[in-house]
Image (cartoon, coloured by chain):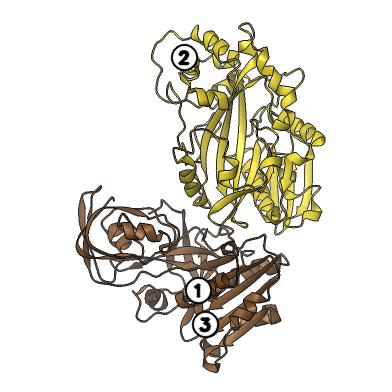
Amino acid sequence: MGITFRKETFRDDFTFRNSPEHIRRFPFPFHEDSYMYAVNIEPHVVGPKGSVLENLIDVDEHYVAEMQDRALVLAEDPLRCQSLPHMTLAGWDLLELLMEQQALGYPEHFTLTRDGDRWRWINRPLGIDDTFTFGDTSTLPYGPMEYITRQSQGDFCILDQRDGNLWMDAGMVTTQADWSLDFDIGMNFFEWHAPVPLAHEKGIFTRALKFLTNIQQGKPARRLNWTMTINPRLDTSPENYHKWGPDRATVTPENVGDKVHLRVELQSFWRLPRSNGIVFPIRCYLIKMDELVTQPKWARRLHRVIRDLPEELATYKGLTRYRSTLVEWLSKLDDGSPTSPGFGPD
Amino acid sequence: MSTGTTKLDVVVSDVVPVNDLVTRFHFRRRDGELLPTFSGGAHVVVEMRDGERTRLNPYSLMGSPLDTREYTISVRRDDVGRGGSLFMHRHVKPGLEMVISYPVNLFSLDLRAKKHLMLAGGIGITPFMAQTAQLAGEGGNFELHYTCRTASLGTYADVLRERYDRRVRLYHDDRDERIDLDRLLSTQPLGTHLYVCGPAGMINWVRDRAAALGWPSEAVHFEHFAAPQPGLPFDVTLAVSGKTIRVGSQQSLLEAIEAAGVDPPYLCRGGVCGQCETNVISYDGKFIHNDHWLSEEDHRSGCKIMPCVSRFEGKSLVLER
């Protein structure tokens, strides 16, 4: 049985919703009732059936709508997709990875056939059936990275590894939590993380870089990150701040449940075989408060996390304007009883 | 130990003597599938079951990264070494089932380079076999300068000349042919990256001259696997696992730790990658540091050791393992 893809929008009338099955598979990011940074990296291995980790590259009911939204973003601003000249080989690595993983996880929707360098790619949800020569950019309508990331959910950063550092030298970034590829392109790991508060002092980035530069082929890793977004808007970019920034002043006690969304990023890290680069897919999951609180454990825990969040983190995540309204709303769903360990709903 | 890499079950598909010192080994997957794609400069760690002992030696992949039906390595016989190369030469025959690691690349091409200038000495030619194949396939600009003792010991010199013609320049020690290094390094176009792999003396010479001639360190790449050196036996206490072990004279500290059933992570086993870095809790004696990972300050501090290549002489050593 295949996925039923929803017809929905991430802008204007914001018709994005999660089905009940998708609410239960939401990657809730808090395993306890408080939150602080940690290098929360673990091996990216297949998880339980029915979770977002059932396949290493997840395709869900929002796939078609997300790809349509990406196309709209790119039409307005082509600089959301950039690849420095030395990154083409890494783009082919990524194309291979995403085609292989999507075809493996969802054979009813995607098929990859290889005959030496001659590859045929069928993407049924988007109505694509292309035959091309692997390694020959002239046989695709876009560069290899752009071609495949127009057909894959989530943002993708390709990092070149050299001089003991990682460099943001290519990417497709249209579903980001307020950062800009056009600004970060060519920067190294410490440069693009410079704005993050508290973590530098804890030495987190030095340790994280050491870990990432040692990621091995065939052994990807992952971590979760989170923030909040008003309205289910995928494209919360600095370039479009004027479109979404003011939304944060529109939260009222009456519309919290509908407007405030928990935004979770499933970040994974993969060594690319030909280029020796690292690809960093950042997959964004959105869930509105009304949907999230259908799971009582999540409602109680989120209340405690947001209430007790250090001020610097709340500011960095952009919650300041509506934090008290949200905490007040969530407090009514928190009877003070204990929450069970682990991420999942009860 | 699998902290570092995934393992591959392979079978030796061919063993080819190349010259008096060097033999080439071919590996295929036992299940008949393709091997993982790799990038030029990558190595694999080959596990050798030598009686009671497991040897784990890294070797550069030297085949074309474009062909993953088989992996090939070339092993130079070292008659006075610790025995890994002798095991490969004497005991590894076609049909033998072996285990190797996934490829790991600690000597990667910088794909921004406008030109790749490669300097090889002796068996240091092997990573360049793969890198030149990769670059030639992509129309890359490279030039290889290869020093060997004699023409008959010039491993793959003939193959390289045939493939790449004038892009390969050979130097024979027995004919007193020497690279005019200063001239070579002074006449490269902007954007050239320099790669060197060979004996330690050659690597140091090239790095020193490049630095003296104003090459930025980011443009100078070197592959420097130090083979573990034999030495006096010494005793070590592993505080975390509560074991006391003896490191034999032909054994590395890492091998002795593994033999005791403790598995620190590793990748290169040559003092380069940093994976097996180990904290020293206390010591009374002298460290013999042979790695290229820790800083000089770390070496002086007596707080850290790289057990893959470094040793100890003295009364007592307690490690956080």
Toward which corner of the image does residue B200 lie, by quadrant?
A: bottom left
**B161 lies left or right of A221:** right
Circles 3, 1 touching at the beta carbon (< 8 Å): no
Q: Which residue is mark 1?
A: B203
Tell me, for residue A300, which label it has, or none.
2
Name the tint of chain B in the rendering.
brown
Q: Is residue B70 visible?
A: no
Toward which corner of the image does residue B217 lie, by quadrant?
A: bottom right
Q: Which residue is mark 3?
A: B18
Quadrant, the C terminus of chain A: top left
The Cα–Cα distance between marks 3 and 1, rounded to whole angstroms, is 25 Å
The secondary structure type at the circle numbered 2 is helix
The Cα–Cα distance between marks 2 and 1, rounded to whole angstroms, is 61 Å
> Residue A152 location, x and y as percent?
68, 38
The answer as to whether the residues below labels 3 and 2 share one chain is no
Q: Residue at x 24, y 71 (%)?
A: B232
Tell me, for residue B168, which label it has, or none.
none
Specify the amino acid type for callout 1: Ile
Chain letter belonging to callout 1? B
Chain letter belonging to callout 2? A
**B64 lies left or right of A304:** right
Circles 2, 1 touching at the beta carbon (< 8 Å): no
Specify the amino acid type for callout 2: Arg
Circles 3, 2 touching at the beta carbon (< 8 Å): no
Count neighbours of disc 3 (C-alpha within 10 A) and say few if under 14, some if 14 to 19, many if 20 or more: some
In the image, the chain rendered in yellow is A
The secondary structure type at the circle numbered 1 is helix
Quadrant, the N terminus of chain A: top right
